[in-house]
Image (spheres, rainbow, N blue to C red):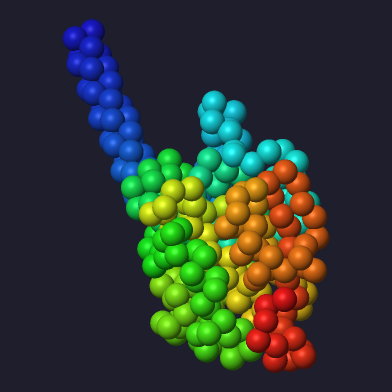
């Protein structure tokens, strides 16, 4: 009898072991299936999706808490746009440049649309690998810093640069200051805030920020929705940035300056007398 009991015990243990291993395998397959479908509501309920604003903010806190690299703008400069974002978010926020502060800007606009335009494809790839929740687009400019003075003197003689004509940026081939190579979504969105902190503008072959400033002014003037467009321009201590800001963004629209950052509030020119003017200012 004792031998029969031992055999029965061994059989029962083996049966339970098989059931246990089978259960673990089933659980593993279930979890693997969910992980492959990362957007599953069940996964989102306890892990958060990659596009979840709360998840992005947590990733941002972790990033800055463990990094020695800090944003290039000072705290006082950052606060100019932060104060507006606190009131307007969630909103549409367009940023020229993808940099050390990109995760911060994205986190300041939870639930809104924040798109970064970057001229360096390798840098774009590196940043998005580290922060895949950011939305970055590669763009290739058609200007060089050496052309800045010539473009400023000649744009008034090019009819397609005339703001009163209302020529869409996307279709504007003749005006070299018009950014006509941007993704369709950029043209189709009315931007509440535009930050110009790129492209590079500190050596002769660099694209310079001439086209970014001109195009931001055009986008703001063509706004159809209520309110104006907040435009922020960094590095106004440099001649080109300052000169182009005064030509296209206009001193009368300057709200405040802090350090090397100017904050403009550009009114819409649609259905107003200003729309008929051939001058931006």
Which residue is more in the foreground, 124 or 256? Answer: 256
Name which quarter of the figure residue 19 lies in: top left
Seen in the picture, residue 214 relative to 221 is either above or below; the reply is: above
Residue at the outermost top position:
2
Q: Nearer the viewer, residue 192 or 167?
A: 167
Left or right: residue 105 versus residue 185 is: right
Residue 87 x/y as whole percent: 79, 58
Q: Is 77 or 104 nearer to us in this picture? A: 77
Which residue is pictured at 55% across the width and 47% down the height? 102
**Is residue 271 visible to the viewer in this orientation of the structure?**
yes
Q: Is residue 23 above or below residue 45?
A: above
Q: Position of residue 200 (x, y in %)?
A: 47, 51
Query: Above or below — where is 138 with respect to 12?
Result: below
Q: Quadrant of the N terminus?
A: top left
Number of disc labels: 0
Left or right of 146, for residue 122: left
Image quadrant containing the C terminus: bottom right
Res. 93 in view: no
Q: Which residue sits at x=59%, y=39%?
A: 72
Q: Is residue 5 left or right of residue 131?
A: left
Residue in view at x 57 percent, y 81 percent: 156
State the image coordinates of residue 227 (x, y, percent, origin top left): 77, 74
Q: Position of residue 257 (x, y in %)?
A: 77, 52
Residue at position x 23%, y 8% in the image: 2
């Amino acid at each position: 009898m004792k031998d029969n009991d031992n055999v029965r015990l061994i059989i029962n243990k083996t049966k339970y072991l098989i059931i246990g291993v089978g259960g673990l395998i089933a659980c593993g397959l279930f979890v693997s299936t969910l992980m492959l479908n990362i957007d599953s509501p069940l996964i989102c309920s306890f892990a958060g999706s990659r596009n979840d604003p709360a998840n992005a903010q947590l990733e941002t806190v972790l990033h800055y808490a463990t990094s020695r690299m800090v944003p290039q703008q000072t705290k006082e400069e950052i606060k100019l746009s932060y104060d507006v974002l606190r009131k307007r978010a969630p909103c549409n926020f367009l940023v020229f440049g993808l940099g050390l502060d990109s995760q911060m800007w994205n986190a300041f606009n939870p639930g809104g649309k924040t798109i970064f335009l970057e001229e360096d494809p390798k840098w774009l790839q590196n940043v998005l690998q580290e922060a895949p929740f950011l939305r970055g687009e590669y763009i290739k400019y058609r200007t060089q810093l050496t052309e800045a003075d010539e473009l400023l003197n000649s744009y008034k003689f090019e009819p397609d640069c005339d703001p009163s004509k209302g020529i869409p940026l996307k279709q504007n081939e003749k005006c070299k200051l018009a950014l006509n190579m941007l993704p369709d979504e950029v043209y189709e969105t009315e931007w509440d805030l535009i930050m110009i902190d790129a492209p590079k503008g500190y050596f002769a072959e660099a694209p310079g920020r001439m086209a970014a400033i001109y195009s931001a002014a055009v986008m703001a003037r063509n706004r159809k929705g209520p309110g104006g467009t907040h435009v922020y321009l960094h590095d106004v201590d440099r001649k080109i940035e300052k000169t182009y800001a005064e030509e296209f963004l206009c001193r009368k629209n300057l709200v405040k300056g802090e350090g090397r950052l100017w904050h403009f509030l550009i009114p819409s020119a649609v259905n107003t007398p200003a729309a008929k003017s051939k001058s931006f200012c």
